[in-house]
Image (spheres, rainbow, N blue to C red):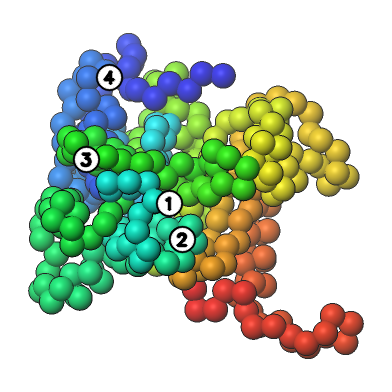
Amino acid sequence: MGHRTCLRGNYVASETIGFVDHQSCWTGMRIEGKFESDFREIPDFDSAIQKLVTNELDIAVIPAQLVHGNHMRLLSDGLSVSGALNQNRPFHVVVSSDRLSHLPRSALVISDSRIVRRQLRRFRKDLRVLSPVAWAGICDLDQIPSDKCEWMEEMRRDGTIDAYTIPRDVYDRRGLKARRFALWPEPKEPGGSFFLPPIHSDLPLVITRSGYPKTKLRGNIGDEGAAAWHIMSELFSAESEAFTSSVGILVKYRSVSSLLQQAEATRDLTLEQACRDSEGEILQDGTKLLVRIEHVSSDGSRTFRMDRLIEPENIHSSSVTMDREWRSLLSTLSQPQPDHPRWGPGNPAFFEGQ
C-alpha cells in the first residue's frame, strides 16, 4: 500500500497553496520543492484561515496542533480538513554527549514537551527533568530567550545542563552538529523502553473550502496521515491542550505477522493481545492500522496504554469504539476504588490529579 506525502500532480499544480510553520511541524520543510505551484508561508493560523475564506488561497497546509480545538471555527468559516501528509519523524531526539542510559546520576534534562518529560522520568527516575519555563524560573530569568534552542544548546555546551530534547525536524532545521539520540516510538530490545510521540507531532493537515473536490488531492496526500488525524480528532478533539500534552500516540499501517514478531521479540504482552480477537484467536494476517496510545503520570511512575488494530475500511466505527473504551478506562483509573466485600480494601486513584 503506497502512502505518498507530497502535493504533486496535474490538478494541484495550478492551485495557490499557503503553509504555516510551527515547532510541532515544520510544514515548509515537508512541502518545499515537492510540487509545482505557487506556495507561500503564512505567519499564523488565523491568517491562513482568513486567506482561505477570501479566496486568496485554495489550500492551506497547517500543523495539526494549531487546528486542534478549532473544529467549530473551520465549520463556521465553511472550511474542512481535506487530508493530511503522513508523519515522517514525529519523535523527539535527546541532544547530549551520551545516551540517556549513560548520563550521570541526577543528570539535568530540559524538554519542552510534557509527555516527553514524563516518559523520561519513567525511563530513569533519577533524572532531573524540567521544562524550559521551570528552569528559567530557577535561574531567575524574567523570560526565556527568544531563541530557545540556541539557549539550551549553549547551556549544554558549557555544562549547565546535561541534555535537552527537541523534535527531530527542529534538529535538522537548525543544522545542529551535536550528538543526538532518537527517542524511538518502539522498543529495540526485549523489555526495552519506548517513547510514543507527542500527539499531533509532525502532522501537516490540508485545509480547503468545504466542497473542494478531494479527487484533486487523490494520490498526493497520505492515507496514514489522514487516518492519524481522524483518530486523534475522534478521541481528543474536545480535550484541552493541558490534557493532550500528556498523551503519546502512534498510528501506523502494519501487518499482523510483523506485529506478532515484534511482540515476541520485545516481550510486549499488550501488543500481542492486540493481535488477537475477543475469542483469543490470532487475527487474520493483512495490513491493519495499529493505534498505540498512552497517558503517563506526572512523575512517570504510572502508565495507561491502549493498543488496538483497526481495519482501515472501518476506521470511523472503530474510532468511536476506541473513544468509549479509552474514556471509560481512564475515568475508572482516575477515581479511588472503594472497599469491596470480595476484593478487599479500596485503593486510591491510579491517576490522581494528572
Tell me if mark 1 has few (under 14), some (14-19) or many (20+) residues whose alpha carbon lies within 10 angstroms of its own.
few
- Tag 2–tag 1 contact (CB < 8 Å): yes
Q: At which x and y percent is residue 154?
A: 13, 53
The dot on residue 34 is 4
Q: Which residue is mark 1?
A: 101
Which label's residue is closer to the chain start, 2 or 3?
2
Tell me if mark 2 has few (under 14), some (14-19) or many (20+) residues whose alpha carbon lies within 10 angstroms of its own.
some
Residue 142's image quarter? bottom left
Q: Which amino acid lies under the numbered mark 1 shown in the image of this protein?
A: Ser
Real-space Cα distance between discs 2 and 3? 22 Å
Q: Which amino acid lies under the numbered mark 3 shown in the image of this protein?
A: Ala
Q: At which x and y percent is residue 91?
A: 40, 43
Q: Which residue is mark 3?
A: 178
Counting every numbered tag in the picture gives 4
Q: Which residue is mark 2?
A: 124
Q: Is the residue 43 above or below the residue 314 in the image?
A: below
Q: Which amino acid lies under the numbered mark 2 shown in the image of this protein?
A: Arg
